[in-house]
Amino acid sequence: MQNLTVRLSWILVLLTFSVLVLLACGAGFYALQQGAHIVANGGDAAAQQAAFADIAQWLRWALLALVLLTVVTVIVVMWGVAANVLRPLDNLVGYFERMAQGDLSQSVHVPGNNEIGRLYLALADMQASLSHTVGEVRESGASIYDRSQHIASGNNDLSARTEQQASSLEETASSMEQLSSTVSHNADNARQASQLAGDATFTARRSGEEVGEIVTTMEEISQSSHQVGDIITVIDNIAFQTNILALNASVEAARAGEHGKGFAVVAQEVRSLAGRSADAAKEIRHLINQSLSKVDAGTERVNQAGKTMHTLVEAVERVSDIMDEIAAASEEQSNGIVQVNQAVTQMDQVVQQNAELVQQAAHSANELEKEAARLRDAVERFTIQTEHHLKLT
């Protein structure tokens, strides 16, 4: 009976009721046919009445038998429907109610190999699939919860470190701005120093040229002094010869007697003049010698000053070159500091954006952790089975 399909059961019920209806119709038709036969045969009324009474009695027993058979059939059909349909469906509803409450560990008892049995088999498969799915969801939820905790913790640490890095970059950017200002000021000072060194180089070169001109002038003065000394020597020789000539004239005037007195006086004056000329020439020679000594000393000092000035010019030129190099290096350093400052500013902006993204990621991780906790709590209400329990009854 349990393997009897629902469709076949209803077919049997319909056939049974059809047979009962046919029997009822056949009994009625038989009674009508017998009544018609009695009427056709004729006879006295008493005989016909007795015949009709027998037919009625038979019809009553036939109808009673049909009623009893119908009642038995109805009872059998109701029992079959209750056993094969209602009770399995009631049990099936109980399975579904317990599944709705989260019990996925039930052992499904299949009542037979019919439609209801296949429904139980589908229920068992659905319960096994749900149990497997809930188990995987539970494991995945636990894994997601644990990983979301790690992600949230890591994001919190990363957020704190990113904030520290952003703060450090802000301080670095501020320091770089100050350094850029200082380097720019140094570059300006270096340019001014280079300009001053260039001016000093020009002045030193000009001074060197002037000292060279002074040296040349002193050499010319020294040459002129030597020429004057030569001229004084000639004047001294002339005075000496004039003195000798005046002495000779005096001797000749003395020999001439009275006639030579005037000439003697003139010779004496000439001799006196020649003496004074000689004395003046000696003084001039002495002064010229002193001047020559001083001119030579001055020339030596001017030459030394010229050499010193030349050395100074070379040193100033080297200083100017060094200052130019310092100015160029300061300019490059200033440009480099500006680029580094721009890079640090961009890094600060990127780190600020990263900090915002990390905060958003931390917030999302915290929300994911909450959702994972809710998912874990949601699947904890299910009781799952470790194996697929299926029992045929």
Image (cartoon, rainbow, N blue to C red):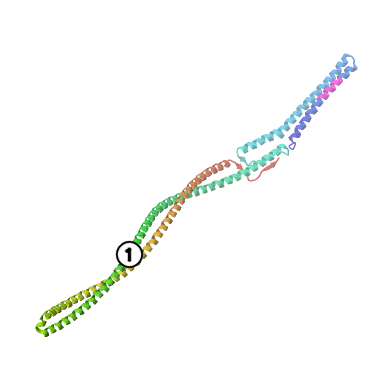
Q: Is residue 156 visible?
A: no
Q: x and y percent of residue 186 in the render?
A: 37, 57
Which quarter shows the N terminus? top right
Q: x and y percent of residue 47 in the render?
A: 88, 16
**Which is more toward the observer, 389 or 375?**
375
**Residue at left 44%, top 54%?**
339
**Residue at left 58%, top 44%?**
138
Which quarter shows the C terminus? top right
Q: Is residue 7 above or below residue 344?
A: above
Is the magenta region chiefly helix, strand or loop? helix
**Which is more toward the observer, 261 or 368?**
261
- Left or right, residue 180 beside residue 145: left
Q: Is residue 336 above or below residue 292?
A: above
At label 1, counting other C-alpha atoms closer than 10 Å, the crowd grade (few under 14, some 14-19, many 20 or more) is few
> In which quarter of the view is residue 232 placed?
bottom left
Q: x and y percent of residue 350 in the render?
A: 48, 50
**Which is more toward the observer, 362 or 314?**
314
Which residue is situated farthest in the left direction here? 258
Q: Is residue 212 magenta?
A: no
Q: Is residue 381 above or below residue 38?
A: below
**Residue at left 23%, top 76%?**
231
Stretch in magenta: 24-34
Q: Is residue 223 visible?
A: yes
Which residue is identified by label 1? 206
- Left or right, residue 106 beside residue 232: right
Which residue is situated farthest in the top direction here? 45
- Left or right, residue 211 beside residue 355: left
Q: x and y percent of residue 205 in the render?
A: 33, 65
Q: Is residue 28 magenta?
A: yes
**Which is more toward the observer, 63 or 206?**
206
Under tag 1, what secondary structure? Answer: helix
Amino acid at dot 1:
Arg
